[in-house]
């Protein structure tokens, strides 16, 4: 049986930035943007087959977000 590694990133902030970050999430990555009043919460679930691959995916996602946050 193959191992599976998963982590969840959660970001909260303004609706405008939340929508912008949500649009950056690749189509093959599970994500959800919840907007409540003036607060957006973006949850991104990243899956990988190894810890190294998971780390690389998380690093790439955070680097992408940091350019737009």
Image (spheres, rainbow, N blue to C red):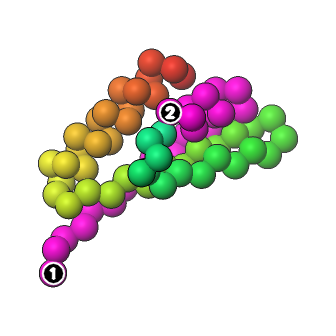
What number is the disc on residue 1? 1
Q: Residue furthest right?
A: 37
Residue at 75% x, 44% y is 35
Q: Residue furthest front?
A: 27
- Picture coordinates of residue 47, whole percent (x, y): 33, 57
Segment tinted magenta in the rendering? 1-24
- Picture coordinates of residue 36, whole percent (x, y): 79, 46
Query: Regarding mark 2 in the picture, which secondary structure is present there?
Result: helix
Can you tell which quarter of the image residue 56 is in?
Answer: top left
The residues bearing labels 1 and 2 have C-alpha atoms spaced at a distance of 32 Å
Residue at 65% x, 33% y is 19
User: Quadrant location of the N terminus?
Assistant: bottom left
Q: Residues within 10 Å of mark 1 (few under 14, many from 20)?
A: few
Q: Which residue is mark 2?
A: 24
Can you tell which quarter of the image residue 48 is in?
Answer: bottom left
- Picture coordinates of residue 17, whole percent (x, y): 64, 27
Pick the residue in front: 27 or 53: 27
| Nearer-N-terminus badge (1/2) | 1
Query: Regarding mark 1 in the picture, which secondary structure is present there?
Result: loop
């Amino acid at each position: 049986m193959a191992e599976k590694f998963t982590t969840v990133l959660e970001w909260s902030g303004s609706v405008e930035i939340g929508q912008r970050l949500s649009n950056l999430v690749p189509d093959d990555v599970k994500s959800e943007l919840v907007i409540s009043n003036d607060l957006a919460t973006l949850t991104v679930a990243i899956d990988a087959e190894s810890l190294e691959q998971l780390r690389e995916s998380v690093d790439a996602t955070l680097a992408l977000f940091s350019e737009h946050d």
